[in-house]
Image (tube, grey):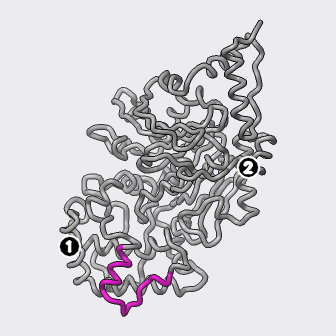
Amino acid sequence: MRITIRRAVAVVAAAASMAAYGLAAPALAEPGSAAATWQAHQAGQDIVDRLEQVDGLTIVKEEPPPAPGFRFFFLTYEQPIDHERPWLGTFQQRFSLLHRDTSRPMILHTTGYGMPERAFRAEPTVLLDGNQISVEQRFFTPSRPENADWTKLTIKQAAADHHRLVQALKPIYHKKWIATGASKGGMTSVYHRRFHPEDVDGVVAYVAPNDVHNNADRAYDKFFEQVGSSRQCQDALEALQREALKRRDELVERYEDYARQHGLHFDRVFGSADKAFEMTVLDVAWAFWQYWLEEDCDIVPEPTASTDEIWEFIDLVAGFDFYADEGILPYAPYYYQAATQLGWPTLKFKHLKGLLRYPKLYQANSSLPPELRAKHDPRPMIDVDRWVKRKSKQMLFVYGENDPWGAEPFTDSGRDSATFVAPGANHGANIAALRPEDAEAATAMLRRWAGVDAQTARAAAAGELGRHIPGLDDWDPREQRPALVP
């Protein structure tokens, strides 16, 4: 028996590459064994060759390397419209691949929305020096079937999309898999884990809302009563909302002029600039706490401020373009899921009594065209919540203390799972924002799930693992979304 020269060169090269990062070299399989044959096959193939062998997968293009040691691809994968009735047809689901090395863990980043159009690393990818796929949620264009049947947009169908993709890529990326996502992406990673718990070895869900009982939303009102170190900031936001509604006529007139100048319309969803204006004002306090900090409260105008100042603040924090058709319709898949399964936060807005014109406006169906408005089914969220509390394991939840979306969080099972809250943080909370001892515990848990060995842990301590890479780590995919969705 002998080791071929080609295989020996490949193994030595791989070992040298891993040594450069302080990683353990892969064990050399017994010559002639099935494992040795598999190693030789892997070592002799470029990643493009191996991806092209995956049935249903198409490499759309390979981008220039975003950083030394990485390759980046845009791809599509053929998915059934209905996983229970695959004969109904298929659609192409977009995803991206940031390839590091098949000897590294794979991070399944579920966006919950569209696919980011650039290379980036989610925090677990940084902490593990891993590979990453970032998957577009079904029904976000262009990952939408022609003549789409929206009843196929469910958490179970989306989880099946991710399951099929994981199974297709595991023969290539055979090390540990970690699922992650932020906000609705974090929710999506939880739903995937619920329906296919063996697909991944752990989940890191960031700022993931858990609206178990859609009609029981007292937690959100309580959040706004208590947020911040004092009532000063929230009082200022509420006073600003009241003043904006008192100046409704001149602000709506300005809104209509703004819409004409920017080619915006209100035909398909809200029907008028006045209704869209009211929805925008209702969102001001929520949007502020979602992506601003308490220390920024000095930018909130006083009620005596000019109309220009009030307009500019609302536009800065909430954005007047969002509730126009052009802003809201791309997010129809989110609002449809919120209306039918996920639930939505309902606030009482007692401080705006007598100033509102549209009863029950603050709900998911209000942000959908009439043909997509649908009845809510409470059963899926109750099922997921029960499963997370009782049966889940290897689940890590991270929330921001001052993030309204965390008012109704998931409760972990305590079975090799944990929940951490970043003090003073907003909807951008992550492990790095935690207290040092919590960040250390969360990182250790993640690396253990990912199969990081002692030698790699030493490399981490030396700064070789988790190092910052400019360009890849300076961007958060949530920046593509407005501040008014999770």
The secondary structure making up most of the magenta span is helix
Q: Is residue 281 above or below residue 231?
A: above
Mark closer to the chain start, 1 or 2: 1
**Residue 8 falls in which quadrant of the image?**
top right
Residue for point 33% across, 71% down: 279
Residue for point 20% across, 68% down: 261
* Camera-side residue of 360 and 233: 233
Residue for point 59% across, 42% down: 107
Q: Position of residue 402 (x, y in %)?
A: 57, 72
Residue type beneath disc 2 = Asp
Q: CA distance from mark 1 to mark 2?
A: 54 Å
User: Which residue matches tag 2?
Assistant: 416
**Residue 150 falls in which quadrant of the image?**
top left
Residue for point 28% across, 86% down: 247
* Camera-side residue of 445 and 279: 445
Q: Is residue 279 above or below residue 239?
A: above
Q: Position of residue 154 (x, y in %)?
A: 43, 45
User: Which residue matches tag 1?
Assistant: 256
